[in-house]
Amino acid sequence: MAYEYSKYLRKGKIPHIWCPGCGYGIIMKSMIRAIDGMGWEKDDVVMTSGIGCASRLPGYIDVNTLHTTHGRSLAFATGVKVANPKLNVIAMGGDGDMTAIGGNHFIHACRRNINITCFVFNNHIYGMTGGQYSPTTPKGARATTAPFGNSDNQFDIAQLAIGAGATFVARTTTYHAVPMEKIMKQALEHKGFSVVEIIAGCPTGYGRKNKMASPSGMIEWQKEKSVAVEKFNAMSAEEKGDKFPIGVLHQETKAEYIEAYDANVGLS
Ligand SMILES: Cc1ncc(C[n+]2csc(CCOP(=O)(O)OP(=O)(O)O)c2C)c(N)n1
Ligand code: SF4
């Protein structure tokens, strides 16, 4: 039987703003199924986001939601979690929101290992404002602000999160909608700061400029370039080429921030 999404949707907010072929609808559906799978009361779930097409997602979901300022999803999420650690806090945003203007909040949330789940929607571009290049735009790719090709090296969001101390880091794509749900659930279950980087297509802001105008072409690209991490790790550098690993890339157990803080000041 088909999954019934209506319990989690704010129907008054539909139609959504996303373009036809945008990957974000796939992410929203996987996210709803993952949250539902946790069996939480909706009142105990808080979602925060910054600004951008990605950051519109919480507006469509009927839990407690905070649509904040650009790059500040994790700052608000941290405030909510510290005020009431019993809440299940999920922060999200686009690659621009989380790793450009919000980059400092992102690395420090990773470092603290606070028990928040962070979903980063990586469409390799600033979608909402018309396709300016972001920290994840590939070198050489075209953007409205890089008509001759982007000169900057790109961030690898998952590696950035691992390097900064996140204790659960995974990557998936919108091609992998069902595995995405499972990975999201693993991230929600993890105690500590968890990051899921989700590769998504923006046919409007990125695809049109980079010979991938059709949404299905962007999904084909994700299918072709992604490799399960176990297989990826066994490949030679030549075989890896421009492919990228997907799955759970890192998981460890480390003191959670609020518990460590409470113990330090004698509250537990
Ligand atoms: C302080 C501030 N600076 C700039 C903007 C303009 N702005 C809105 S969304 C956005 C980029 C969004 O890109 P991303 O986070 O990658 O999300 P996407 O739209 O691609 O999902 C920018 C620069 C803003 N709203 N606030
Ligand atoms: S501009 Fe890109 S990211 Fe924004 S809704 Fe359209 S396709 Fe999606």
Image (spheres, rainbow, N blue to C red):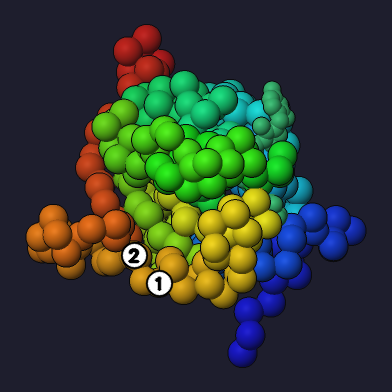
> Which quadrant holds the N terminus?
bottom right
Q: Is 6 on the left-hand or right-hand side of 41? A: right
Q: Is 245 on the left-hand or right-hand side of 68? A: left
What residue is at 20 percent from the left and 60 percent from the top? 240
Identify the residue position indicated by label 2 in the image: 226
Judging from the image, what secondary structure is the residue with disc 2 in?
strand
Q: Cβ of disc 1 within 8 Å of ligand 2?
A: no
Q: Amino acid at mark 2?
A: Ser
Residue 15, quarter of picture: bottom right
Question: Can the viewer see residue 192 in this picture?
Answer: no
Farthest residue in the front direction?
148
Identify the residue position indicated by label 1 in the image: 223
Q: Is 241 on the left-hand or right-hand side of 7? A: left
Please provide percent x and percent y for residue 67: 72, 37
What residue is at 47 percent from the left and 21 percent from the top? 104
What residue is at 46 percent from the left and 73 percent from the top? 220
> Which quadrant holds the C terminus?
top left
Farthest residue in the bottom direction?
1
- Characterize the local packing of mark 1: few (<14), some (14-19) or many (20 or more) Cα atoms within 10 angstroms: some
Instruction: From the viewer's side, name the closer residue of 155 and 11.
Output: 155
Farthest residue in the top direction?
265
Judging from the image, what secondary structure is the residue with disc 1 in?
helix
Residue 252, quarter of picture: top left
Q: How much space separates mark 2 and mark 1, taking CA atoms?
A: 6 Å
What residue is at 64 percent from the left and 41 percent from the top? 144
Q: Amino acid at mark 1?
A: Lys
Which quadrant of the render holds ligand 2? bottom right
